[in-house]
Image (cartoon, rainbow, N blue to C red):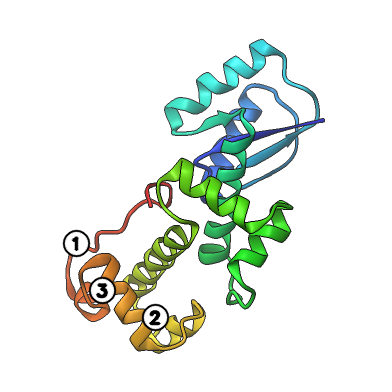
Amino acid sequence: MTTIFIKNMVCNRCIMVVQNQLDKLGIAVKSIRLGEAVLENNLSPQTKQNLEAALVPLGFEIIDDKKSRIIEKIKNIIIDQVHYQDSELRTNLSDLLSSRLHHDYHYLSNLFSEVEGTTIEKYFIAQKIEKVKELLVYDELTLSEIAFRLNYSSVAYLSNQFKKVTGLSPSHFKNIKDHRRKPLDGV
């Protein structure tokens, strides 16, 4: 059994696409989730090369070095928490990352900033703003409900952060045709 780490797996569709490529290559998969696949057997160098050749045109990449794997895990935890968890984040982000990755938050924060050129907090905020955009476009929740769901202390705080990141108020964003959403791996 071996685990491979895959860059740019940011949604359930990504999981399906990677699973499909693994199936096409006859690679037995024990489990697959954002950013990683646990395989039944070790990959031969040729099979790994074939897998990389199949994944790269689809926007994915196998990650071999430890630092890159940690960065990708941080991103996937944040994306999962913001976009796919119905419950609000009630624990501190630093505690969540430290407990899931078994590293001191200070180490994780410095590594992330060094490699990505931004802080974990700014990345987290950018993901939250993309989620706010999505919920505004769907037009099913009020701004108060969106603020509550994403654990903002107030609508005013959400609005200020939204405007700081996008340059628009949430209501102005909601009324324009081109909603300027980014793909999650581009945030």
What is the distance, in whole Å, between disc 1 and disc 2 at their CAs?
19 Å
Question: Would you call the spot at circle 1 few (<14 residues within 10 Å), some (14-19), or many (20 or more)?
Answer: few
Q: Amino acid at mark 1?
A: Asp
Q: Earlier in the sequence, mark 3 or mark 1?
A: 3
Where is residue 173? Give x, y as percent.
Answer: 22, 72
Viewer-side residue, 41 vs 157: 157
Residue at 36% across, 72% down:
138
Q: Nearer the viewer, mark 1 or mark 2?
A: 1
Q: Secondary structure at mark 2?
A: loop
Q: Earlier in the sequence, mark 3 or mark 2?
A: 2
Residue at 38% across, 63% down:
130
Where does label 2 land, which residue?
140
Q: Quadrant of residue 98?
A: bottom right
Q: Quadrant of residue 31?
A: top right
Q: Amino acid at mark 2?
A: Glu
Residue 19 shows up from this direction: no
Disc 1 + disc 2, Cβ < 8 Å = no
Q: Nearer the viewer, mark 3 or mark 2?
A: 3
Question: Residue 112 vs residue 174: left or right?
Answer: right
Q: Secondary structure at mark 3?
A: helix
Q: Nearer the viewer, mark 3 or mark 1?
A: 3
Where does label 3 land, which residue?
163
Against 104, residue 173 (above or below) is below
Disc 3 + disc 2, Cβ < 8 Å = no
Image quarter hosting the N terminus: top right
Viewer-side residue, 180 vs 113: 113
Where does label 1 land, which residue?
178
What is the distance, in whole Å, between disc 3 and disc 2 at their CAs?
21 Å
Q: Earlier in the sequence, mark 1 or mark 2?
A: 2
Question: Would you call the spot at circle 2 few (<14 residues within 10 Å), some (14-19), or many (20 or more)?
Answer: few
